[in-house]
Amino acid sequence: MTGRQVVVTGASGFVGSAVLRHLAERYPQLVPRVVSRTPAAAAAGAVHRVGADLADPASLRGVCEGADVLLSLASYVGPDAGRCAAVNSAGTEALMAQARRAGVRRIVHLSTCAVYGPGPHRGADVGELTPAPVSPASGSRLAGEASVLAAGGLVLRAGLVLGRGDRWVVPALADALRRVPAQWDGGAGLASFVDVDDLAGLLATFALGDGAAAGATGVLHAHHPDPVRNRDLMHALAGHGVLPERPDADWPWSRCLEALAATPGWVSERQFTLLAQDHWYRADAAWRLAGVDPGPGPLDRLGRAAPWYRERGAVTPG
């Protein structure tokens, strides 16, 4: 393991930071080459830091030289369409060009199930849905996937990610609950979730593992195989003191959308729909190929992230 060179992009981000923690714990002799616009979060082990920006292809020159493995985790998920294209599409294409030029043998790239667009989606596997992204972020990330696949890499499409460092999912739930103070259509919506540390372990296994994991290419879903029901998630977050208990009132979906639109906030109708209605996808293949136990599920992992959420109030998008 000490003779392998691993490049990690997006290492200062939510998932990237978790991957660095996992690498330091699981592979203490490994010194990853960390590529980031900003200083990466402190890791338990040594890292070699390289400053580069996917939005500036010239800055990527040489970042993969001598590398065996590339963990491509950087993305931009904000509303700026130009930056989405620059980072997620053109930037990923430029990064893959560098990886191919350097002869990198293993590429693992993190994408999102948001590329499938509007639901409801209920238990589809890869290949059973045609991607239909509706936002600049998801559209540009789908475009970036094409560059990864052309380079012979593995694309992992994740569902909603929970855990320490989450600045979108639980804050979005908090904003939505403030504006729609009721059960959302019975709280029956099912969605695919994954704990960030479980996702980090899966990413690392596909990047550095052997056997079937080492040979996996194409596209796989990367979240816990069991979907999470909205009312169960909200109840668990309330139990950890992260969100208030939701009122017993049960509003039909039409009333939920009316209330969301009538009260100012930052969560859009599209985002609310992703959180509250059926958007779940089969993911057993990824865990089987990796030879990794997916564990008890993201609700059972919430306890270790709850202090992080409580300290920040779970109300500020990041």
Image (tube, helix red, strand yellow):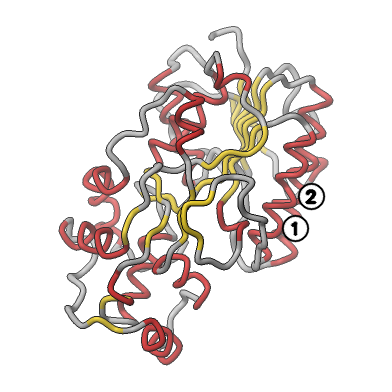
Instruction: Check disc 1 and report the residue beneath it.
Output: 85
- Is residue 55 rendered to the left or right of residue 34? right
Q: Amino acid at mark 1?
A: Ala
Question: Compared with residue 72, is residue 247 higher up or lower down, i.e. above or below?
Answer: below
Q: CA distance from mark 1 to mark 2?
A: 6 Å
> As rendered, which of 267 and 296 lies closer to the eye?
296
- Is residue 142 rendered to the left or right of residue 220? right
Q: Position of residue 249 (x, y in %)?
A: 20, 83
Q: Position of residue 2 (x, y in %)?
A: 54, 8
Q: Residues within 10 Å of mark 2 (few under 14, many from 20)?
A: many
Q: Amino acid at mark 2?
A: Ala
> As rendered, which of 96 and 35 lies closer to the eye?
96
For mark 1, give the secondary structure: helix
Question: Compared with residue 57, is residue 3 higher up or lower down, i.e. above or below?
Answer: above
Q: What residue is drawn where x is 50% and y is 33%?
A: 286
**Pointer 1 and pointer 2: residues touching (CB < 8 Å)?**
yes
Q: Position of residue 69 (x, y in %)?
A: 64, 22
Q: Position of residue 262 (x, y in %)?
A: 42, 92
Q: Which mark is residue 306?
A: none
- Is residue 183 rendered to the left or right of residue 270? left
Q: Quadrant of residue 310?
A: bottom left
For mark 2, give the secondary structure: helix
Question: Compared with residue 155, is residue 193 higher up or lower down, i.e. above or below?
Answer: below
| Figure disc tally | 2
Q: What residue is drawn where x is 44% and y is 22%?
A: 291
Q: Quadrant of residue 189?
A: bottom left
Q: Residues within 10 Å of mark 1 (few under 14, many from 20)?
A: many
Instruction: Check disc 2 and report the residue beneath it.
Output: 90
Q: What residue is drawn where x is 41% and y is 25%?
A: 292
* Mark positioned earlier in the residue sequence (1 or 2): 1
Q: What residue is drawn where x is 65% and y is 68%?
A: 134
